[in-house]
Image (cartoon, coloured by chain):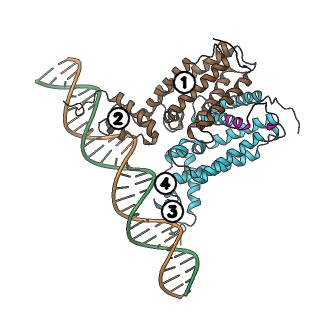
Chain colours: A brown, B cyan, C green, D orange
DNA sequence: ATACTGTCTTGACACTGTCAAGATACCCGG
DNA sequence: CCGGGTATCTTGACAGTGTCAAGACAGTAT
């Protein structure tokens, strides 16, 4: 009758994901063990295996959550009204996303899932969808019509994402960059991009 | 009397490092266990502990080796005679370094050592020395004298390294980028940088 | 009510990093 | 040459880990 003692948990799948996200954020992948997770959910060691094929599958699900969040961030980005300023805003938002949950970001883009383990088909789909949305930003009006000749939007998307990604990684891993440098460095990167794309700073008002 | 059966290995420290590098390259950090390593060196499970404080220390030593290699690569870089072309060459060299041994690169810059574990003092020193050498490239003649006003060389160094780093990571982790795209994307990144810095393509001969 | 199926459990196995104690071999002062 | 000290290497043990196999329980459909 008591809530804690019933045999069927009832909502274990969701509970595991929620609890795993907490554990990941607080302790990193290293600290995220299925056994500890099960214990936290008030369930036996192997119960999670009825909801996720293995640890890799759980991690993929976790990463997938992250990509969904990132995708909404991408949708909110507005480059149309003021390209340069919008770009700057987007970069800051991206870096904020990364630094709010470093371990999640690591999981999303790291080697653990994409090379060592096997990314779930579902994860792959969501991640690529996320990237496609980013590419779209390059192919659509504000940028697409102003790009210098000879610039392939796809290549530009890849190169600029790489910059964003590199900034995040260097910052999160805490080598060569720390939070104090971040604003100045990211501004520098945006400047470089703006100059390279000859966007100029726009002086439009609302 | 036989080589394999003597009690004191004689050169275990070096052997461990060498063997660990192989194991790292082939199997990644996940596959690099001290026990397996010891077995490969023909020695008992806990022997390595007399040469490295713990696994973290071993990994730090491994990463340190990587940074030393990277540093020599930095010294060979020549931006003086032809800045733009030299930059392009350097970028390619960097990416080649990264993709020749992805697991090593991951270890050098990844979260494992710099956040989760404790970077050795020695590792920190070498890594920062490596970065300083990169910064120097920005502060010295070919670039320093040609930078647009308002560009802080330090920020430029950080931002450009971030781009380099991001390209490497996206490539190595195999998400959004693969080897085939690489050349085009890195060229695009270099173009962006050159345009941003207003270096122009130099047409110097020998 | 009975059979079925999804969920959860205990038991076990092979692996991991690391500590404590003991064994061995080398090295240096006598 | 010899004895002790020290660096090196060993076995034993412990607490963790992911994962499989077999059994226990509960809800659902027939």
Q: CA distance from mark 4 to mark 3?
A: 12 Å
Q: CA distance from mark 2 to mark 1?
A: 27 Å
Q: Which residue is mark 1?
A: A128
Estimate the x, y position of residue A88 in percent, counting from the top left: 64, 23
**Dot 2 lies on which element?**
helix
Estimate the x, y position of residue B35 in percent, counting from the top left: 46, 55
Q: Chain of mark 4?
A: B
- What residue range appears in magenta? B143-159
**Dot 1 lies on which element?**
helix
Are discs 2 and 1 located on one and the same chain? yes
Q: Which residue is mark 2?
A: A49
Estimate the x, y position of residue A153 in percent, counting from the top left: 67, 20
Are discs 4 and 1 located on one and the same chain? no
Q: Nearer the viewer, residue D21 or B154?
A: B154
Asked if the residue under mark 2 is in contact with the one under mark 3, i.e. CB atoms within 8 Å, the reply is no
Q: Quadrant of residue C21?
A: bottom left
Q: Quadrant of residue A171?
A: top right
**Drawn side of residue D18 relative to residue B102, left or right:** left
Q: Nearer the viewer, residue B71 or B47?
A: B71
Q: Chain of mark 3?
A: B
Q: CA distance from mark 4 to mark 1?
A: 37 Å
**Drawn side of residue B138 relative to residue C19, left or right:** right
Asked if the residue under mark 1 is in contact with the one under mark 2, i.e. CB atoms within 8 Å, the reply is no
Q: Which residue is mark 4?
A: B34
Q: CA distance from mark 2 to mark 4?
A: 29 Å
Q: Is residue A96 above or below residue B67?
A: above
Name the residue: 35% across, 35% down: A49
Q: Which residue is mark 3?
A: B50
Bin the neighbour count of mark 4 within 10 Å (Cα to Cα): few under 14, some 14-19, many 20 and up: many
User: Do we see residue B172 in this rendering?
Assistant: no
């Amino acid at each position: 009758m008591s809530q804690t003692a019933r045999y069927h948990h009832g909502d274990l799948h969701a509970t595991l994901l929620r609890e795993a996200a907490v554990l990941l954020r607080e302790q990193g992948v290293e600290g995220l063990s299925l056994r500890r997770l099960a214990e936290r959910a008030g369930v036996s060691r192997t119960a999670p295996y009825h909801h996720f094929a293995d640890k890799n599958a759980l991690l993929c699900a976790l990463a997938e959550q992250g990509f969904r969040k990132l995708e909404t961030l991408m949708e909110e980005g507005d480059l149309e009204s003021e390209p340069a300023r919008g770009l700057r805003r987007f970069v800051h938002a991206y870096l904020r996303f990364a630094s709010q949950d470093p371990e999640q970001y690591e999981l999303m883009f790291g080697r653990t899932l994409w090379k060592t383990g096997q990314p779930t088909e579902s994860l792959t789909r969501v991640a690529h969808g996320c990237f496609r949305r980013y590419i779209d930003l390059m192919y659509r009006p504000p940028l697409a019509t102003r790009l210098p000749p000879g610039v392939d939007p796809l290549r530009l998307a890849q190169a600029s994402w790489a910059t964003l990604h590199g900034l995040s990684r260097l910052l999160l891993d805490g080598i060569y960059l720390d939070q104090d440098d971040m604003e100045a460095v990211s501004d520098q990167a945006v400047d470089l991009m703006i100059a390279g794309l000859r966007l100029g700073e726009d002086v439009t008002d609302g």
